[in-house]
Amino acid sequence: MKDSTMLNETHNPQLRSWVASAQQPGTDFPLQNLPHCVFRRRGSTEPWRGGVAIGDAILDMAAAHAQGVFGAAADTAAQAASAGTLNGLMALGPQAWSALRLALSRLLRDSAPETARLQPCLVAQADAEYAVPAQIGDYTDFLTSQYHALNAGRIFQPQAALPPNFKWLPIGYHGRASSVAISGTGVLRPQGQNRAPDAAMPVFGPTAKLDYELELGIFVGPGNPRGTAIALDAAEDHVFGICLLNDWSARDVQAWESVPLGPFMAKNFLTSVSPWIVTLEALAPYRTALPRAVDDPAPLGYLQSASVQGIDIQLEAWLTPAGSRQGTRLSRTSYRHAYWSVAHMLAHHSSNGCNLQTGDLLGTGTQSGPEPGEEGCLLELTRGGQVPLRLPDGTERGYLQDGDSLLLRGWCEREGQARIGFGECRGTVLPAREI
């Protein structure tokens, strides 16, 4: 086991890259980040292959590996990182991931003797298009934010705002892996059943309450055999990294269908993920204590550990109406407010012997904070559409309209450390199709 919370030479904030844009103020992708993706040149018929972000460029891992610049410790991981999906890399585990990160850090530093050999291996991010970075076998969405749980509960079930089991276990439901799509994929307004509170019967048609959810996605590395459980303190050995995630939701459909079995058609039509997977090792400088009140119950044994931490990832959601060049920030919050950690999600998911598999995706659920403006979806921000937001162009939004573009951003920053980011997760709402 390699402790992904420990700092090493790759985190040194003084490191500089021979890729000049990696030193630009505010860049998401300095040398201290090095997230992975799957890409090809936009509009080409090139094969999809793995890449690593550095500044405004992508290091083409297939081209870099062909240069023979990786030593024995990182060569297998470098080859796996060049494939058309990252499942092979994810399966190798934390020692291989760490060896590759160290090799990449040294190869991309401004003093690297391999600079001339690797410069032709760079592709501008502006010239690239991206694919979902893994073959996803299963997708599970969790509810880990107590503030989202409280705010949504006050709308859907005012008599029991916080579920009675929330502080005992990370609540989750199985989503739809086949409808996970890469950032930029259009969001077709879904059709579904809903029933107004005073109506005698439901109706079927396009949702009138389309919403976004400001989330993070966790990609599973090595899995566990069926019938075994992942121990909490070992759970992060099974996590390759984290991306941005938007679990689009039809709130009117959700309100009608969710009792007794939870979300189904309200959420399975599309889940958007950002192209970049930031490794847990890159996030080591931004660890933080989990939020716990003195009167919170002590977790059951399999969910209890003094070493489990959260991560302070800043998160934002922006809305741009059709035809507008001006975006409006809807919310800003942080993943540090999450009640349940990444490790808790994996440990609980496998505690009954469920076998997680390499490439599986876990969603954190909507991330909200305790203060106004930290709500992670329109359901919370508009109190179920009852208090619409007023945009700079004078229009209002209770929920998303056709033509609206939604943008999620995420980054980490802390004094004495390099700022690292997650890129963007985008989607534009398209009109419903006739059925």
Image (cartoon, rainbow, N blue to C red):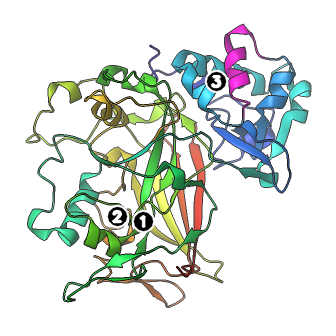
Going from the N terminus, do you reach mark 2 or mark 1 first? 1
Counting residues from the start of the chain, the first of labels 1 and 3 encountered is 3
The span shown in magenta is: 70-83
Residue 172 in percent (x, y) is at: 30, 47
Against 99, residue 131 (above or below) is below
Quarter occupied by residue 234: top left
State the quadrant of the N terminus. Answer: top left
Residue beneath disc 2: 375
Q: CA distance from mark 1 to mark 3?
A: 33 Å
Q: Disc 3 designates what residue?
A: 101
Contact, mark 1 vs mark 3 (Cβ under 8 Å): no
Q: In the image shown, does 1 or 370 lie closer to the viewer?
A: 1
Measured from the top left, where is residue 296 in percent x and y? 11, 41
Q: Which of 20 and 167 lies nearest the eye of the viewer? A: 167
Q: Amino acid at mark 3?
A: Arg
Q: CA distance from mark 2 to mark 1?
A: 6 Å
Q: Which residue is mark 1?
A: 331
Q: Is residue 390 visible?
A: yes
Q: Is residue 363 visible?
A: no
Mark 2 in CB contact with mark 1 (< 8 angstroms): yes
